[in-house]
Amino acid sequence: MVVKTTFTDEKLKKIVSEYDIGEFIKSKPFKAGYVQTNILIATNKGKYVLRYYENRSKESVAFEADLLKYLGEHGYPCAMPIKNNKGLCTFIKSQPVQHNFHNIF
C-alpha cells in the first residue's frame, strides 16, 4: 500500500516562506503517482510543485536535483529545483515531518 503524506495549509505556508516564491494562496495534491507526494502550490508569484520524498535517501534526492540542474543548464526542458532562502535545494524538517526531504520545482 502506498503511503502519502498530507500537509496542512499552515505547514505549506511555513515551507513556502522559506523560499522566494511569494505568499501561499492555495494547494492541491496530485492524485497520480505512487512513490512520492506531489502537491501543486499556488502563490502570488506563480505555481510550483512541492515534491515530498517518502522513502528516498539524501544521496538519491541530491542526485536527482543535480541531474535536473545539469539537464536544465544544457537546454533540456525539465523542472529545475528551486533553492530555498539558505541556498539549499533539499533539507530536513522537524516535527511533524521528520527525516524526509522535499524539493520545490
Image (cartoon, rainbow, N blue to C red):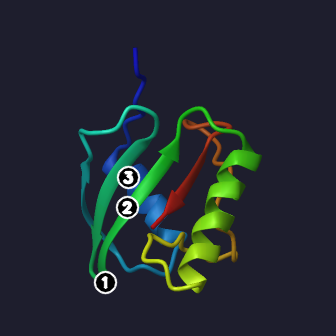
Residue behind mark 3: 10
Q: Secondary structure at mark 2?
A: strand
Task: Tell me where residue 87 sits by quadrant.
Answer: bottom right
Of tags 3 and 2, which is closer to the observer?
2
Q: Position of residue 94 (x, y in %)?
A: 65, 43
Bin the neighbour count of mark 3 within 10 Å (Cα to Cα): few under 14, some 14-19, many 20 and up. Answer: few
Q: CA distance from mark 2 to mark 1?
A: 13 Å
**Front residue of this view, candidates 69 and 91:** 69
Q: Residue at the spot x=60%, y=32% of the render?
A: 55
Q: Amino acid at mark 2?
A: Val
CB contact under 8 Å: marks 3 and 2: no
Q: Which residue in the rendered view is the most extreme toward the right?
A: 59
Quadrant position of the N terminus in the picture = top left
Q: Whole-percent x and y of residue 103?
A: 54, 59
Q: Quadrant of residue 91?
A: bottom right
> Which residue is painted at 64% across and 65% down in the image?
67
Left or right: where does residue 41 sit relative to residue 2?
Answer: left
Q: CA distance from mark 3 to mark 1?
A: 18 Å
| Residue linked to disc 1 | 45
Between disc 3 and disc 1, whose residue precedes? Answer: 3
Q: Is the Cβ of the residue at disc 2 closer than 8 Å to that at disc 1?
A: no
Q: Considering depth in this image, is 13 or 101 the residue closer to the camera?
A: 101
